[in-house]
Every structure is written in C-alpha cells, then in structure tokens.
Image (cartoon, helix red, strand yellow):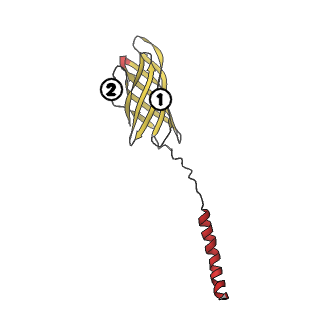
Amino acid sequence: MTRAFRILGSAAVPALALLAAACIGIERKSTTSPTSLRSLAGVWSSSSIIPSPESCSNFQWRVTEQTANSLTGSFSATCAGGLTLSGTAHGTLTTATTITWSASGVATAPGLPSCGFTLNGTAQLEGDRIVVPYTGNTCLGPVSGTEVLTRR
C-alpha cells in the first residue's frame, strides 16, 4: 500500500499543482481598446444638395489624421441662403460606433461679411456610412439637422 501511495502521490503532486494554477487563474488583458476605430481616412460626403431654411447640406469631411480613438480633418457644407462653410472637424470615438464631433471655421455668402460657425453632434457609425445629427450656429442663425455621409 505504501508503494501504491508513493506512485499515486508522485502523480498527484503535478496534478495538484496544475489544479491550483487553474484555480488561481491567469488574467490576460487585451492591448486593443474596445473603442478602437477602424480606418475612416479619406473623404466622406452627403448626397443631399438643397438645404431647408434651418439646415445645411452637402457635408464633406476629409479625414486626414486618425488615432485609435480620434479623427481630424477639413470640413465643408452648404447652408440655406447660399452660406458656404469651411473649416476643420474633430471627432472622438466614445463607443465602438459613436463619435462625438465638432466643426468650426468660416462661413461666407455673397454680399455678407465672413463670419464664424460652429457645429457639433454625436454621429453613429453604421456599416459603410456615418449618420451625423448636428446643431450649431452660423451668421444667418441657428442650424440643425441630420446628414448621412458615405465614403467617396
């Protein structure tokens, strides 16, 4: 019996060590953030052409810089009254499919002095498109709406 116990005992030690290691567990942390952003570099634009009196259209966002969770690039749009917006846009990924964004720059229109504009919102990544609700101010007053951007 002693010999049997020694044989079983010698096999049991590695088994117990393995069992103890399994109970302790090894935690592995991923180095990839759950909010990593797929490549969105390039030109994204909307297809609507005629804005309503309180909205803008013909959005174009040229994403020129991208990190794991942010986007930066040039921005342009057309608003009612012939107002043309041009400036920069910045976005921060807040979830895997949500981008909090803002745009600012100069608005110009025939017969009016140039003025600043600001737009902001929370966009949703939906497959190959970005749905961009926005609110903001131009020299012709407040604007709001939703544009759908697709890569061009």
Is 145 situated above or below 33?
above
| Gap in angstroms between the C-alphas marked 2 and 1 | 19 Å
Closer to the camera, 73 or 120? 120
Residue at the front extreme, as displayed = 1
Estimate the x, y position of residue 41 in percent, counting from the top left: 46, 38
Closer to the camera, 41 or 139? 139
Q: Are marks 2 and 1 in contact (CB under 8 Å)?
A: no
Q: Residue at x 43, y 22 (%)?
A: 85
Q: Which residue is mark 2?
A: 49
In this rendering, the label closer to the viewer, 2 or 1: 2
Under circle 2, the secondary element is loop
Closer to the camera, 109 or 104? 104
The circle on residue 51 is: none
Estimate the x, y position of residue 128 in percent, counting from the top left: 38, 41
Estimate the x, y position of residue 76 in percent, counting from the top left: 43, 26
Figure disc tally: 2
Q: Which residue is mark 1?
A: 74
Q: Is residue 112 left or right of residue 12?
A: left
Q: Residue at x 42, y 34 (%)?
A: 43
Is 111 situated above or below 40?
above
Is 32 situated above or below 118?
below
Where residue 135 sits, quadrant-wise, is top left
**Residue type, label 1:** Ser
